[in-house]
């Protein structure tokens, strides 16, 4: 936001500077959380825009992921006669990896870009300045509600995605490919553990991803030059940076949790 | 400087700028600028594009910090205020942005009510009445339910003005209020500026280019160029005060102290004629 | 203005409810928590010496028709049979008390289920009753062993507490593989080391201290889960009054079957000739 500090040269140095600035921005965001409770209505509004409006894409993609996964698994497992395990494999792979990661990527593309663009445009049309003039802290009013909304929405979206994926897998496996319904569920429930897979996998991972994507989206919105091309670049950077961060964080979390 | 309420101090300047120096990106915006905004009057600040008139407004509100010098608003040094004191100060200043800066997610009523909802716990009834009164003052009470993108430029500016006066501020800063307005809308805005100043005694600072409009409404005008005040006085008399700046700026010369040619090297050399003279 | 706000709030609230409903669905229907549920059914106890690959929630069938599911599988320390509780739909409440419960396999490689074959007694099973007659699952090696007449060469050998056992061939058994009794895991393989003196593989088994009533003439066999699954050590209880203690060695062991041996035996016994060349 300040054009007075000297900018580093070189792409690597600039990327590092961005990462550092992003981290510092996180501290600003967290510090503004108590102030943002005054704007609780705004947070609820953002949960609607960020979460509920993403439901369509999440549900449709979840359904297709589950269906495709079951198709692929069936053909491979039938070589070993192990198709009865396909339900279990679909559930495990979705809960542990595909659910959180794909949901986060879709979230970055749909909600992350809209957050960045919205904030960037607010800066370009002086709305942020106007808020400062009206003695309303723009971080507490604009940034933190969107960040919190992302934190709330991501795990919920991930649960919906996973449920749709299991449903899609069931649809293809049991209804179309003829796997026994009882076997499908019994193998799955025998192996899926609430603590390791659902809590660690879906909830913890998606919470972490939600934090990262929301942070990056809000940061990009607040720090890009407030011009139309600045906003365009910012939305692209949101998606790119979010994707890299999601997959890197996924690796780290998997190593720690599983 | 420990006054914390808005009772008038015993001098007649609401805003005192002393020795203001600011350097941005290597460019000197202000060079030991001195300025006094008289209380209760309409003051215009004019100058060539890019002299930092908007930047000056931002210094007054504390959005930007100077490298040297000081700005006192109502007796308080803006740069030394704590965050809460600064916010309190801003509640007493209304700012009209060039592009209105209405919040796009809310309708006109909500936009005007925004400061009230944020800073007061007034009951809904009272807020409603206050908002409608301010809208009535700017002539847009019937447009209360429109969304910002349904408003024309002039209407949006008037809504922004209603929002700026919702706390009955002591100072209003107008950033290019006449830009892009048709004559009718321009006259409406002029009327409002005059009315607010005459009936409520609100000190008004105008940053504008349009001399004709400024002459109709301003009591005092400052001409700022090269980071300094190069001329000041009554707007109706200033065009004749004899300095080269006013002659170019108000007399309409394309070339003068503000040069036509952007600084460049030798012309003959650029065209390839070496050794040619001036 | 407040209509706008309340519609957002309602929408956001609906979204949150949907998310939690999905979470609840996932947790209760697709995870192991689901196995704790019961429909309108009654519970019958059975015991098996070997449950094979039977899992909780596996179907219980009569004449091939699903009538319930396996509710729980436990091994009481000190016992050498697995207690299996079956949850049977109340519709099917005329199961004679002398019926037989068997662990069957669906097809050659499919999952295992419990099949109930009607007996002829007049008294029927009630909630909490016990099916006394059971037939356990047959590990692959025993079946093949019976077929080919190649019995187990029972090798010599005798906390968790650790117990040693030596095998002439451990197949693909490795450290960490489960140790099972009656099909239920009671410990794990701690190490597999080649013994240069005895020229066999010395396997150290780490057995949970709860199971401290294993007779010291029990046999340890290397079995395979299914046809191509991983290998594990199964303990078949003997009848000695003395029990295995920490550091003992199990005398009776049965090595892993090698695929080549099986095929070779099949070819040899099928053609009745000792000439390997004729087996083609």
Image (spheres, rainbow, N blue to C red):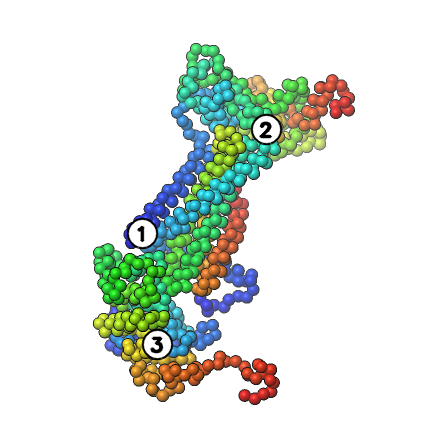
Q: Name the one closer to the observer, B190 or A189.
A: B190
Q: Is C146 placed above or below A212 here?
A: above
Which quarter of the rendered picture does the N terminus of chain B lie within? bottom left
Q: Residue at label 1?
A: C4
Q: Residue at label 2?
A: C225
Q: Is residue A56 left or right of residue B72?
A: right
Mark 2 or mark 1: which is in front?
1
Please report, as a chain letter, where disc 2 is located.
C
Q: Position of residue A223 (x, y in %)?
A: 45, 62
The answer to whether marks 2 and 3 sit on the same chain is no
Q: Name the one closer to the observer, A114 or B55.
A: A114
Q: Is B206 placed above or below C187 here?
A: below
Q: Is residue B42 left or right of residue B278?
A: left
Badge 3: few (under 14), some or many (20 or more) residues near its Cα, within 10 Å?
A: some
Q: Earlier in the sequence, mark 2 or mark 1?
A: 1
Q: Position of residue A16 (x, y in %)?
A: 52, 60
Q: Residue at label 3?
A: B210
Mark 3 or mark 1: which is in front?
3
- Write the residue at 39% across / 25% down: C40
């Amino acid at each position: 936001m300040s054009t007075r500090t000297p900018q580093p040269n070189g792409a690597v140095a600039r990327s590092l500077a961005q990462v550092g600035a992003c981290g510092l921005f996180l501290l600003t965001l967290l510090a503004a959380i108590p102030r943002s409770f005054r704007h609780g209505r705004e947070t609820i509004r953002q949960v609607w825009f960020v979460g509920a409006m993403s439901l369509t894409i999440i549900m449709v993609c979840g359904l297709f992921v589950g269906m495709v996964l079951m198709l692929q698994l069936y053909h491979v497992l039938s070589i070993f006669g192990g198709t009865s395990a396909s339900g279990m494999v679909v559930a495990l792979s979705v809960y542990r990896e595909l659910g959180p990661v794909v949901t986060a990527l879709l979230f970055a593309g749909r909600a992350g870009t809209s957050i960045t663009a919205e904030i960037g445009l607010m800066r370009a049309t002086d709305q942020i300045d106007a808020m400062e003039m009206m003695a309303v802290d723009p971080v507490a009013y604009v940034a933190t509600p969107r960040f919190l909304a992302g934190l709330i929405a991501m795990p919920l979206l991930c649960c919906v995605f996973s449920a749709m994926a299991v449903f899609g897998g069931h649809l293809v496996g049991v209804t179309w490919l003829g796997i026994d319904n009882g076997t499908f569920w019994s193998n799955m429930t025998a192996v899926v553990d609430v603590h390791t897979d659902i809590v660690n996998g879906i909830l913890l991972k998606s919470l972490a991803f939600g934090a990262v994507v929301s942070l990056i989206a809000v940061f990009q919105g607040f720090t890009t030059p407030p011009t139309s091309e600045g906003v365009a670049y910012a939305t692209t950077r949101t998606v790119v940076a979010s994707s890299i961060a999601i997959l890197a964080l996924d690796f780290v979390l998997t190593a720690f949790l599983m | 400087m420990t006054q914390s309420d808005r009772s008038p101090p015993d001098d007649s300047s609401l805003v005192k700028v002393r020795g203001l120096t600011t350097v941005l990106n290597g460019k000197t915006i202000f060079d030991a600028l001195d300025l006094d905004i008289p209380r209760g009057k309409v003051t215009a600040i004019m100058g060539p594009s890019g002299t930092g008139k908007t930047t000056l407004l931002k210094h007054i509100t504390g959005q930007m910090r100077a490298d040297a010098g000081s700005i006192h608003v109502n007796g308080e040094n803006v740069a030394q205020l704590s965050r809460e004191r600064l916010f309190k100060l801003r509640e007493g200043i209304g700012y009209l942005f060039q592009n209105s800066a209405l919040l796009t997610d809310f309708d006109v009523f909500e936009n005007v009510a925004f400061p009230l909802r944020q800073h007061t716990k007034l009951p809904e009834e009272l807020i409603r009445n206050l908002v409608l009164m301010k809208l009535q003052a700017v002539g847009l009470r019937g447009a209360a339910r429109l969304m910002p993108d349904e408003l024309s430029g002039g209407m949006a500016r008037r809504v922004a003005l209603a929002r700026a006066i919702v706390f009955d501020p002591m100072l209003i800063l107008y950033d290019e209020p006449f830009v892009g307005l048709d004559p009718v809308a321009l006259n409406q805005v002029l009327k409002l500026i005059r009315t607010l100043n005459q009936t409520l005694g609100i000190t008004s600072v105008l940053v504008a280019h349009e001399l004709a409009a400024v002459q109709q409404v301003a009591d005092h005008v400052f001409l700022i160029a090269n980071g300094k005040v190069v001329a000041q006085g009554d707007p109706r008399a200033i065009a004749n005060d004899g300095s080269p700046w006013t002659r170019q700026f108000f007399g309409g010369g394309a070339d003068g102290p503000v040069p036509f040619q952007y600084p460049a090297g030798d012309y003959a050399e650029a065209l390839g004629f070496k050794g040619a003279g001036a | 203005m407040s209509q706008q706000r309340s519609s957002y709030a309602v929408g956001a609230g609906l979204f949150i409810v949907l998310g939690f409903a999905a979470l609840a669905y996932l947790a209760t229907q697709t995870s192991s928590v689901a196995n704790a549920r019961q429909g309108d059914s009654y519970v019958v106890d059975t015991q098996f010496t070997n449950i094979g690959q039977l899992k909780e929630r596996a179907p219980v069938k009569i004449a091939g028709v699903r009538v319930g599911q396996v509710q729980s599988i436990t091994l009481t320390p000190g016992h050498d049979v697995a207690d299996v509780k079956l949850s049977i739909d109340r519709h099917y409440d005329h199961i004679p008390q002398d019926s037989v419960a068997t662990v069957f396999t669906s097809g050659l490689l499919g999952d295992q289920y419990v099949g109930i074959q009607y007996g002829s007694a007049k008294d029927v099973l009630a909630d909490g009753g016990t099916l006394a007659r059971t037939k356990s699952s047959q590990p692959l090696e025993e079946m093949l062993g019976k077929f080919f007449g190649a019995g187990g060469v029972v090798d010599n050998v005798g906390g968790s507490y650790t117990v040693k056992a030596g095998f002439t061939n451990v197949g693909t058994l490795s450290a960490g593989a489960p140790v099972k009794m009656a099909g239920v895991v009671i410990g794990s393989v701690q190490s597999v080391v080649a013994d240069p003196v005895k020229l066999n593989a010395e396997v150290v088994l780490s057995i949970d201290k709860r199971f401290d009533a294993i007779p010291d003439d029990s046999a340890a066999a290397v079995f395979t889960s299914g046809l191509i699954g991983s290998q594990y050590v199964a303990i078949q209880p003997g009848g000695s009054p003395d029990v295995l203690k920490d550091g003992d060695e199990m005398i009776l062991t049965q090595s892993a079957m090698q695929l080549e041996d099986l095929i070779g035996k099949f070819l040899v016994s099928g053609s009745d000739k000792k000439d390997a060349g004729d087996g083609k």
